[in-house]
Image (cartoon, helix red, strand yellow):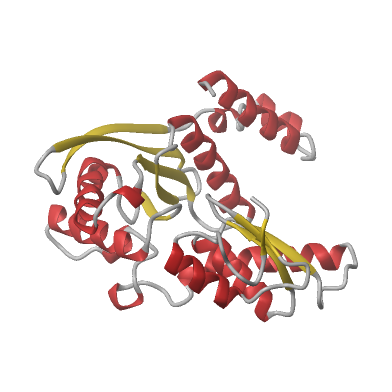
């Protein structure tokens, strides 16, 4: 995926939305939408991290601040081996739209580091987290850009980053980052807030289609922080979870399954393979 493709994707979405505005022609003539067709700021860093064996490894990271027209940029940080800049640009663009649609005073941003957290020790993960925040510290802050958890980043990682940022500026600043543990200035419910939002959207969509929710069957793709909590919340609300999957496997039971049991099995075995209460389908 190249810059031209990303640009076209953003422009197509903007043009499609703007065509529904009563004043769309005026907005276009004043080029009010043009500023959203390219990110405001792109930060690309390469930084060293000391590994447990004493070697030094260079990691690449990105932070895209797409728009600050409505307030400080806001968006998650992800750790994944397939993180790439063009994906980050698109996600930052979408964050800008999401914050505007729900009318909160923030712009959009996104970031990530190219790494596989599963291959890093706890110490290596902490050193990487702190090193990355040092690289972008000058470009973030409560009134500038506020990072948050995303794929493979936890409350603990956010707290390491918060701590490192405070060391750099020499004073407490818990508002620099969200998604911290509750005892470190975080918010209750943040861990499953994305999942809860997803459930509310699903239920509203089903209401719109006049579909019966009680006993409805669902399949959840992905069993990380968002997928697990979504499956758990849906099960608690009376839905029947018939299938779940992770990056390595997928299981199915037409009668439904216990999310607690599936989660405990995956935690112990690192995969759903062999789970006795469902059929392995992938």
**Measuring 56% from the left and 77% from the top, which residue is drawn there?**
260
Q: What x and y, as percent, mark residue 128? A: 23, 47
Closer to the camera in the image, 181 or 266: 266
Check the picture and name the quadrant holding the N terminus: top right
Residue sitting nearer the eye, 22 or 43:
43
Q: Is residue 130 visible?
A: yes
**What percent of the width, then of the height, locates residue 255?**
77, 73
Q: Nearer the viewer, residue 108 or 261?
A: 261
Give the left or right position of residue 150, taking residue 113 as reference: right
User: Could you tell me which residue is drawn at 84 percent across and 68 percent down?
Assistant: 207
Q: Quick check: 205 above or below 249? A: below
Number of marks in picture: 0
Expressed as whole percent of the image width and height from the top left, the position of residue 180 reads 34, 67
Residue 3, position in %: x, y? Answer: 51, 21
Q: Is residue 92 above or below residue 194?
A: above
Tell me where residue 55 sits by quadrant: top left
In which quadrant of the rendered view does residue 113 lie? top left
Q: Is 129 placed left or right of 106 in the picture?
A: left
Occupied quadrant, residue 94: top right
Q: Give the left or right position of residue 131, taking residue 40 as reference.
A: left
- Residue furthest to the right: 210
């Amino acid at each position: 995926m190249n810059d031209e493709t990303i640009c076209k994707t953003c422009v197509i979405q903007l043009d499609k939305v703007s065509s529904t505005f009563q004043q769309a022609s005026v907005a276009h003539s004043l080029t009010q939408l043009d500023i959203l067709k390219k990110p405001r700021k792109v930060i690309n860093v390469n930084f060293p991290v000391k590994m447990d064996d004493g070697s030094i490894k260079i990691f690449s990271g990105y932070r895209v601040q797409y728009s600050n027209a409505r307030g400080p940029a806001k968006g998650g940080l992800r750790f994944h081996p397939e993180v790439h800049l063009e994906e980050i640009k698109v996600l930052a663009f979408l964050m800008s739209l999401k914050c505007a649609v729900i009318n909160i005073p923030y712009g959009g941003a996104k970031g990530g580091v190219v790494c596989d957290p599963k291959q890093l020790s706890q110490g290596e993960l902490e050193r990487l987290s702190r090193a990355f925040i040092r690289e972008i510290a000058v470009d973030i802050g409560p009134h500038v850009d506020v990072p948050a958890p995303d794929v493979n980043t936890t409350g603990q990682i956010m707290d390491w980053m918060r701590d490192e940022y405070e060391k750099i500026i020499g004073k407490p600043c818990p508002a620099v980052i969200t998604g911290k543990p509750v005892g470190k200035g975080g918010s209750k419910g943040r861990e499953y807030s994305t999942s809860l939002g997803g459930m509310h959207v699903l239920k509203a969509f089903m209401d719109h289609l006049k579909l019966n929710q009680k006993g409805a069957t669902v399949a959840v793709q992905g069993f990380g922080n968002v997928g697990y909590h979504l499956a758990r919340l849906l099960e608690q609300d009376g839905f029947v979870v018939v299938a779940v999957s992770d990056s390595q496997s997928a299981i199915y039971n037409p009668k439904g399954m216990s999310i607690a049991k599936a989660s405990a099995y995956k935690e112990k075995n690192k995969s759903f393979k062999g789970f006795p209460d469902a059929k392995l389908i992938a």
